[in-house]
Image: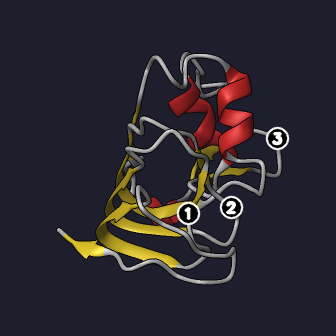
Amino acid sequence: TRFAPVKKCSDLLLLRSDAYIVTDDFRTVLSPKCNGVAPVMNLDSKKYKLVDALEEATADGVPSLVQCTRLTLKPKGKVVMSSKCVFVGEVSIVNDSEDVKKVPGKTHKDTTIDLTNAKVSDDQCLKCVVM
């Protein structure tokens, strides 16, 4: 195909991540590191319906998704990810508060990141709950 279709913000997040690469002839294709299977994106369809919401969530950069099999992002409050975030396997992000919370910039593997009660600086890490 000539291009990967973008119908939802979850598609756009994937295309902006390292799960896709741009070839020498300027085609966007799934990274060989994904072994032919794109990560499954499960973003809240109401909260992330418009591109502006995705822009806010990735204001500090797009996280690495090349090793991710499933990302679930259905927070009550806003969540900000960064290019320092690396998601591996199945990762869920929870924020049941109304506050904006930042996902710690580190590798998160097969875990649920609960930001609800987080009160940490950008450089500190939160305790991840292994699924």
Q: Residue 75's x, y, as percent?
A: 42, 39
Discs 2/1, front: 1
Q: Is residue 97 above or below residue 48?
A: below
Q: Residue 61's x, y, as percent?
A: 75, 56
The residue type indicated by label 3 comes to Phe
**Is residue 28 visible to us here?**
no
The residue type indicated by label 1 comes to Val
| Mark nearer the N terminus (3 vs 2) | 3
Q: Residue 11's x, y, as percent?
A: 54, 31
Q: CA distance from mark 2 to mark 1?
A: 7 Å
User: Do the numbered discs 2 and 1 sit on residues whose CB atoms are within 8 Å?
Assistant: yes
Q: In the structure shown, which secondary structural element does the residue marked by tag 2 occupy?
A: loop
Question: Which residue was labeled with disc 3?
Answer: 26
User: Do the numbered discs 3 and 2 sit on residues whose CB atoms are within 8 Å?
Assistant: no
Question: Which residue was labeled with disc 2?
Answer: 82
Q: Residue at x 42, y 46 (%)?
A: 38
Quarter of the N terminus within the rendering: top right
Circle 3 residues within 10 Å: few <14, some 14–19, many ≥20: few
| Mark nearer the N terminus (2 vs 1) | 2
| Mark nearer the N terminus (1 vs 3) | 3
Q: Residue at x 60, y 40 (%)?
A: 13
Q: Residue 100's x, y, as percent?
A: 61, 47
The single residue placed furthest to the left in the displayed view is 131
Circle 2 residues within 10 Å: few <14, some 14–19, many ≥20: some
Q: In the structure shown, which secondary structural element does the residue marked by tag 1 occupy?
A: loop
